[in-house]
Amino acid sequence: MLLYPFGMQSYDKKSNIGIKKSDVSIAKNYLNEEEIKLLGLLVEQYLAFAETMAQQHTPMYMKNWIGRLDNILQLNGRKLLTHAGKISHQMALEKSNRELEKYKEEQKKYPLKAA
């Protein structure tokens, strides 16, 4: 029996290995199917805009890209993040690694049977 920890939504469900350390540090692995689809649509819109600018030979600079991304997010009814938040990247990594260790300990209670 494999248990899947702490809200992870995206992982190799057919794997007998379970969740790897590299899996827990990827933010999109915590998104559900609908959220992944919405993220994909936003990325698609951003890339379509970039392709249009390239086809028109319009030079773009980083500050332009940031502004355009903000525009795309706002067009899609998203609120812009105006601060860095309360959780640092390092804090998130530490938390996910602690949770992974808890998961591994719990997994030991359910040894895998050979197929």
Image (cartoon, rainbow, N blue to C red):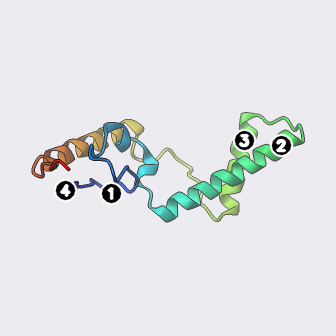
Q: How many marks?
A: 4
Q: Amino acid at mark 4?
A: Met
Mark 1 and 4 residues: CB-CB less than 8 Å, in contact? Answer: no
Q: Position of residue 61 (x, y in %)?
A: 76, 34
User: Could you tell me how far apart the alpha carbons at marks 1 and 4 are, in whole angstroms?
Assistant: 17 Å
Q: Nearer the viewer, residue 86 or 62?
A: 62
Q: Position of residue 24 (x, y in %)?
A: 35, 44
Secondary structure category for the residue under label 4: loop
Q: Earlier in the sequence, mark 1 or mark 2?
A: 1
> Would you call the spot at circle 2 few (<14 residues within 10 Å), some (14-19), or many (20 or more)?
few
Residue picked out by circle 1: 7
Q: Position of residue 107 (x, y in %)?
A: 16, 49
Q: Mark number for residue 53? A: 2
> Would you call the spot at circle 1 few (<14 residues within 10 Å), some (14-19), or many (20 or more)?
few
Q: Earlier in the sequence, mark 1 or mark 3?
A: 1
Secondary structure category for the residue under label 2: helix
**Closer to the observer: label 1 or label 4?**
4
Q: Residue at x 17, y 47 (%)?
A: 114
Quarter of the figure that contains the N terminus = bottom left
Residue picked out by circle 3: 65
Q: Is residue 23 left or right of residue 45?
A: left
User: Could you tell me how far apart the alpha carbons at marks 3 and 4 are, in whole angstroms?
Assistant: 46 Å
- In this view, the residue farthest toward the front is 115
